[in-house]
Amino acid sequence: MTDTVVVDPDSHLSQAELAAKHGLTVAGARPGLAAYTRRLWSYRHFISAYANARIVSSFSTTRLGRLWQVLTPLTNAAVYYLIFGVVLNTKADVPNFIAYLCTGLFVFVFSQTAIQGGVQAISGNLGLIRALQFPRACLPIAVTLTQFSNMVASLVVLVGIVLVTGEPVTIQWLIVVPALLLQSVFNAGVAMIVARLGAKLADLKQLIPFIMRTWMYASGVLYSVALFERHLPEWATRVLESNPLLVYIELMRHALLEGAPLASSVPVLWALAAGWALVAGIGGFVYFWLGEQEYGRG
Amino acid sequence: MAERIPTIVADNVHVVYRVHGAGTPGTGSPVAGLRRLVTRSRPPTIREVHAIKGVSFTAYRGEAIGLIGTNGSGKSTLLRAVAGLLPVDRGALYAMGQPSLLGVNAALMNDLSGERNVELGCLAMGMSKAQVRDQTPKIIEFSGINDRGDFSSLPMRTYSSGMAARLRFSIAAAKRHDVLLIDEALATGDAQFRRRSEARVRDLRSDAGTVFLVSHTMASIVDTCERSIWLESGVIRADGPTDEVVKQYEDFAKRK
């Protein structure tokens, strides 16, 4: 109605032509992969602030606060020590079993919590997603970052356990840094994959605990990896030995423990660790980006 | 007269919601779930709602547009689509820059202090760290949550709903937007804050932006917007000067 009063030079244009003439873009269109990556980079402070906020808010009603970041892995280690060290007295073929067990456990828990958080990264943040426009990949990455911070706290506990159980400090400890970084990339990739799946399929959240438990048994967390060779056919052992979580656990054991039995040789482990990080990291990112417009719908 | 620059162009926009978990009684039992798996039928818990049915309009720079209509007429859905938060089913929506939606249900983190939420909200809007540092005290001052003691360092869960809404409005209004979409946000807060936020909306408009306002309070539409769009069941019933559209709408509401 107002438009008929004003003499408008654009009045003969169709809506689409009008939009094109003034350089308007389609609202909420998915940017290209390179542009998306750049946007994500410009949101890095948001990612770290959000990851930090999640840690603070998860402990905000507890009395001990962030001390739980250290207490949780410590309690975990104590429980496993009680069961496997005292009650069952498992020694198997591993010299320093408690340190061996805790290393496996903490590395595994890092991936487990990142994946569990990833499933809900979209579905649990619909309010934020429907209110603000930002690259959604921020959310699963922030989940991984939160768990990374927990992992660093676990690592402090782990170093304590390793030292107490009589392992020497060696130059090999430096391996921890690249191993942890590769695992973080892997975790972020998987978190992005499950975030997209979890956004579409709420049932996934119910399944994840079982998937993760199976994965834990397949990763030699609670027993020596030598067990696989003895009880499984050749091909199944090969498959299990290239399991990414087993690879990251083995690397960490190789770094911290003297004389821990390894399933594969060290160069093979590195190749697998880097390969999995690349495949999951890039694959997960692209897969998540492809679904960018779907998040927050319905 | 200067050339009018469009900021939002809507071309025959349709929005369809897929609602999960809207099952009718009796379909949620485990047996029914199993039967669906076997027969491969679609779960009845997913229903489609055709919320916007072919809407076209053009919004220009410096305009404040009121969106009115009865509950469930599709106003909020339209805003979400304009903000790019809901995909358009058919038709197209073009926008200048990134429209920002300011709703009463914009989620902040309830366990964090107001101050941390301001920081997080600003970063999520894409501000740089330096901008955030600069803006945080201003935002807290504008929101007025510190008028009765130091509330900004308390967790958001201790805030009253009015205080939380004020803080959310203040965060979103801190950034200069090409297009700002306000969903019922001005209705919250007391009279003093409403005056302040209406003044802020006028500022934003004079910064050559476009403001969309959804409200059931006709007074705030009449005060802030010179143009209004009346939406009913996902269709535009009227689009024009606010006083005319509001009058038509009120006649319609009375007849009902």
Image (cartoon, rainbow, N blue to C red):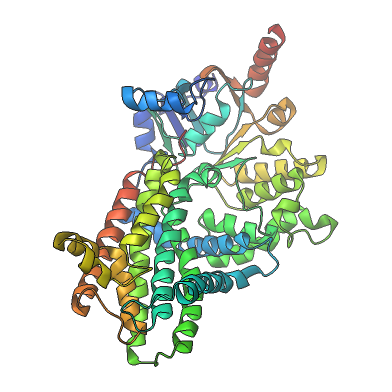
Of all residues, the one furthest to the top in this rendering is B255
For the image, the number of numbered tags is 0
* Rendered position, A10 above or below B163: above
Q: Quadrant of the N terminus of chain A?
A: top right
- Left or right side of B219 for B87: left
Percent position of residue A73, x then y: 52, 71
Depth order, front residue of B240/B71: B71
- Left or right side of A275 for B206: right
Q: Is residue B3 visible?
A: no
Residue at 39% across / 92% down in the picture? A169
* Rendered position, A66 above or below A1: below
Percent position of residue A114, x then y: 43, 59
Depth order, front residue of B73/A161: A161
* Rendered position, B225 above or below A208: above
Percent position of residue A34, x then y: 30, 56
Of all residues, the one furthest to the left in this rendering is A234
Q: Quadrant of residue A20?
A: top left
Depth order, front residue of A112/A49: A112
Residue at 55% across / 22% down in the picture? A2
Residue at 35% across / 70% down in the picture? A223
Percent position of residue A38, x then y: 36, 59
Residue at 31% across / 45% down in the picture? A290
- Left or right side of B146 for A33: left
* Rendered position, A73 above or below B151: below
